[in-house]
Amino acid sequence: MKFSLNIDHVATLRNARGEAQPDPVTFALMAEQYGVDGIVVHLREDRRHINERDLRLLRELVTTKLDLEMAAVDEIIEIACDVKPELATIVPEKRLELTTEGGINVIDNIDHLRNAVKRLQSAGIIVSMFIEPDLNQIDASAEIGADFIEIHTGVYANSKNEEDMFDELERIRQAVRHAKKLGLGVNAGHGLNYSNLKEFIEIKDIDEVSIGQAIIARSIFVGVEEAVKEILKIINRNV
Ligand code: PXP
């Protein structure tokens, strides 16, 4: 299982004072040195955290893999086709949400999303759909030609008791199996942290987890190196 680091909230902290520090690009390059497999950023329409300068610098400097989370809107599709991240992950976006609140509804937006996938792929970008672990959404993602899905793990991460947690794990397990049968790559993320990741990694065949908030929060206390290496240890990677 690979592990990509979402650095959006380093930029949130920087933007709180409108100054230059902490710089998300520096954070990304440090994390690469400590073994992450990729860097994830969400260029939001409201530019709440990551901005275009960050994205373009990251494109020049990231040597692992750059994953751009993005809404399927013209402005951002054009930027993506120009910047050419290795992976574009299509997410829903509402202006007032605190964070991405759930998966995108592929079924209800099939023509629009098919077109977005085609435009991104024709720029050489691999495309992933951030969706709930729902078999119909997975079928729709395959139907529009997506290469990957990213399973929203927020429901798992927020489950109130063990029964709910194991139910959601089972739903995710079945979703992964279904997606793999259709030839899709499978990533997963949202709300994963140092404790709930331990159970989660037992699910087979997930290509990559994408984790942000927990690592950035922990890095304030223990530093970037330790925060990254603790995750790598959980996913059984020697560091
Ligand atoms: N994957 C997607 C699609 C996301 O939108 C986010 C949050 O930006 C993450 C993964 C990472 O979530 P977290 O910051 O809770 O680890």
Image: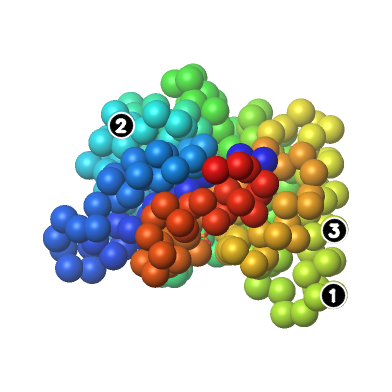
- Which residue is depicted at the point 39% across and 29% down? 63
Label 3 near label 1: C-beta < 8 Å?
Answer: no
- Which residue is depicted at the point 42% across and 52% down? 225
Which residue is outermost to the front?
239
- Answer with left or right where residue 45 lies relative to residue 124: left
- Which residue is depicted at the point 64% across and 35% down? 148
- Answer with left or right where residue 85 lies relative to residue 129: left
Q: Residues within 10 Å of mark 3 (few under 14, many from 20)?
A: some
Q: Could you say which is closer to the camera, residue 58 or residue 104?
A: 58
Per the rendering, the mark at residue 163 is: 1
Q: Quadrant of the N terminus?
A: top right
- Which residue is depicted at the point 30% across and 57% down? 11
Residue 231 placement (x, y as % from top left): 57, 54
Residue 6 placement (x, y as % from top left): 45, 51
Observer able to see residue 24 = yes
Residue 67 placement (x, y as % from top left): 47, 38
Which residue is outermost to the bottom?
160
**Distance CA(mark 1)–CA(mark 2):** 44 Å
Residue 15 picture quarter:
bottom left
Per the rendering, the mark at residue 61 is: 2
**Assess mark 3: CB under 8 A from ligand 1?**
no
Q: Which residue is mark 3?
A: 170
**Distance CA(mark 1)–CA(mark 3):** 11 Å
Q: Is residue 48 above or below residue 128?
A: below
**Distance CA(mark 3)–CA(mark 2):** 39 Å
Secondary element at tag 2: helix
Label 2 near label 3: C-beta < 8 Å?
Answer: no
Secondary element at tag 3: helix
